Image: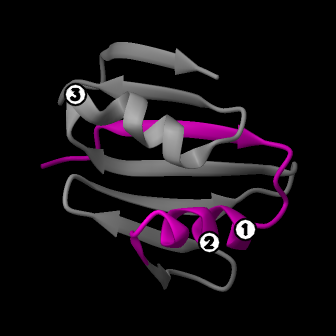
Amino acid sequence: MANNVNGLLPGHRDASPLAERFVRAGWRSTSSSWHGYEVTTSWCEVDLTPLDDGTVLLNGVTAPHRLDDLATVLGVPCTLELCAEDGTVLRELRR
């Protein structure tokens, strides 16, 4: 499946503490770059990439009905978008 979830996590210069949140919730985490992480579970696989402006970019694939669960695991202010295959935003979630 193509990427269907994108998000911004403002106020996080480092993705490591965010990846640790996922690990504490039972997810797997691997380094995907010098500063980025890939976190996975049975229903979701996303990359966490810190940007120069102090925001972490989240993108990947999730089961559409689990978008709220993803936001709950994050537990931080975020904006998440669930997209269709053509890129159309199906749902936006702000916490």
Query: Which residue is tagged 3?
Result: 65
Up/down of 80 relative to 16, above or below: above
Q: Is residue 58 above or below residue 92?
A: below
65 left or right of 39 in image: left
Q: Give the percent coordinates (x, y) of residue 33.
A: 57, 82
Instruction: Say the numbered circle drawn on residue 20.
Output: 2
- Rendered residue at 35%/26% (across/down): 82
Q: Position of residue 84 (x, y in %)?
A: 21, 24
Q: Amino acid at mark 3?
A: His
Residue at position x 40%, y 69% from top?
26
Quadrant of the frame with the C terminus: top right
Please state if 14 lies on the left or on the right of 93 as rendered: right
The local secondary structure at tag 1 comes to: helix
Circle 2 Cα neighbour tier, 10 Å, few/some/many (<14 / 14–19 / ≥20): some
**Contact, CB < 8 Å: mark 2 with mark 3?**
no
The quarter of the picture where residue 65 lies is top left
What amino acid is found at the position of numbered circle 2 in the picture?
A: Glu
Within the image, what quadrant is residue 94 found in?
A: top right
Residue depicted at x 19% and y 61%:
42
Residue that numbered label 1 is attached to: 17
Amino acid type at image mark 1:
Pro
Highlighted range, magenta: 1-28
